[in-house]
Image (tube, rainbow, N blue to C red):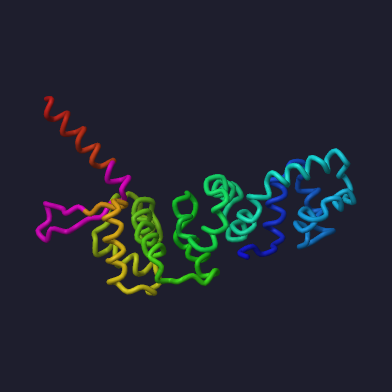
Amino acid sequence: TIVEKNERAIKDFLVHSIDGLGPKTTDAIFLKFGLNTLDVFENSPEKLLTIKGISQKKYEKIVISYQQERGARDVIMTLVPLGISHKIATKIYSKLRDESTDIIANHPFRLCRFKGISFNLADSISEKNRLNPQDPERISAALIDVLYQAEYGGELFRFATGHLCVQYNEWIQKAYLLLKYTVNINTIEQCSLTLKQKQEVYAVSNPYTKDGAIYVFRKEVHEVEVSIAESIASIVTSN
């Protein structure tokens, strides 16, 4: 299993997911049952009635709420200890549902589509789960993350924002760095071709440079750039 018993994650899940439980009651529950707390919820929920402040009515509310939220439990329990907020973990479960645990365990780089999940975070999950560092999903995620970092000021670009595209050779080299030199350049270039074929990125040559340098955009950025260019051209033509 990918889930480890963790005090912080258990308390976070109970406080934010289960109706009727606040920090004080949750602390009392954990004080009594410790790392077996969720086993009590799962197999012997009646033991909760021994906790001061949990009446029969409140107990019934808690049990119903737990049954409704148990699907999200493993996702939250896995992601919160990694520094991912309860809100993002819940959003991931809401989107992926029954696929969540398999994706976290075997395809963590697919999580990078969610805001707040960086390549480095997904890579830490991959390392923890001992996944293949040569996985094309890992390499592709690194290539996309380089473009995100260029736009939003990531560490690879010394936190300078506003780069809507990256020169091709620099793109490959920074992906190589992000991948911690675990993948050779030729393999990274092959994955970059796949991304272009899938139209997840666009490579455009600059006609104003003598060397015909090629610049790479994320799909969404390229579409915006093309739309703006077409609007400007339309205005110029109409005048």
Q: Is residue 198 magenta?
A: no
Which x, y percent locates residue 172?
A: 29, 65
Which x, y percent locates residue 154?
A: 40, 57
- Rendered-image quadrant of the N terminus: bottom right
The residue range painted magenta reads: 204-223
Q: Is residue 35 above or below residue 85?
A: below
Question: Which residue of the protein is positioned furthest toward the top in this rendering?
Answer: 239
Query: At 71% across and 56% down in the image, what residue appears?
Result: 10
Which x, y percent locates residue 108?
A: 49, 60
Query: At 81% across and 54% down in the image, what residue appears?
Result: 29
Q: How many marks?
A: 0
Q: Is residue 209 magenta?
A: yes
Q: In terms of image quadrants, where is residue 145?
A: bottom left
User: Which residue is at the front of the view, 214 or 200?
Assistant: 200
Query: At 79% across and 40% down in the image, what residue appears?
Result: 61
Q: From the viewer's perspective, is 152 left or right of 84? A: left
Q: From the viewer's perspective, is 210 left or right of 144? A: left
User: Which residue is at the front of the view, 201 or 43?
Assistant: 43
Question: Which residue of the protein is positioned furthest toward the left in this rendering?
Answer: 210
Query: At 61% across and 64% down in the image, what residue appears?
Result: 2
User: Which residue is at the front of the view, 3 or 175?
Assistant: 3
Which x, y percent locates residue 171?
A: 29, 62
Q: From the viewer's perspective, is 80 left or right of 214? A: right
- Rendered-image quadrant of the C terminus: top left
